[in-house]
Amino acid sequence: MLSLNHNLSIADEEIQMTAIRAQGAGGQNVNKVSSAIHCRFDINASSLPDYYKNKLFTYNDHRISKDGIIIIKAQNHRSQEQNKLDALERLKELILTAITPVKKRIASKPKHSSVRKRLDNKNKNSQKKDMRKKINF
């Protein structure tokens, strides 16, 4: 059972874990042992509230397919058990970041000192370039 917060959790039956062979270097261990984990979570068939489902569907992430299936591949560790824990943690993190509301940006004005500094700098550059001009009498 994957606990998202104090009052919401996902049952183990809703998460499909498949052991696959990991990619990359690792010698004979990689060729023999299926230590990587392919984690699949169907949003439509889950017991999550509708609010969570809608937020997950609108969340822009490459791990969420158009069919509403979250696919996570965990292969960072050498053992299958550690990869399972890693996949579950990443699934939890994905769901929690999808439901957190985005902070609205508050437009701010530049400080008076920074405006004055910018205008002084422009004035100095202007004077510098005026000194390069040809003098007409």
Image: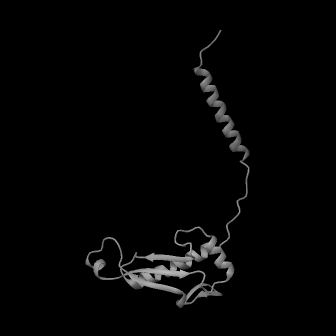
- Asked if residue 136 is positioned above or below residue 10 in the image, the reply reads above
Front residue of this view, candidates 132 and 98: 98
Q: Quadrant of the N terminus?
A: bottom right
Question: Where does residue 102 sit, x and y in percent of width and height?
Answer: 67, 67
- Asked if residue 67 is positioned above or below residue 6 in the image, the reply reads above
Q: Is residue 41 left or right of residue 56?
A: left
Q: Residue at x 67, y 83 (%)?
A: 49
Q: Quadrant of the C terminus?
A: top right
Q: Quarter of the image holding residue 119?
A: top right
Q: Quarter of the image holding residue 97?
A: bottom right
- Give the colour scheme of this rendering: one colour
Q: Is residue 7 left or right of residue 93?
A: right
Question: Where does residue 33 sit, x and y in percent of width and height?
Answer: 31, 83
Question: Where does residue 16 sit, x and y in percent of width and height?
Answer: 49, 85
The mark total stands at: 0
Quick one: which residue is furthest to the left in this view?
28
Quick one: which residue is furthest to the top in this view?
137
Q: Residue at x 70, y 42 (%)?
A: 115
Question: Where does residue 34 sit, x and y in percent of width and height?
Answer: 35, 82
Q: Residue at x 42, y 81 (%)?
A: 37
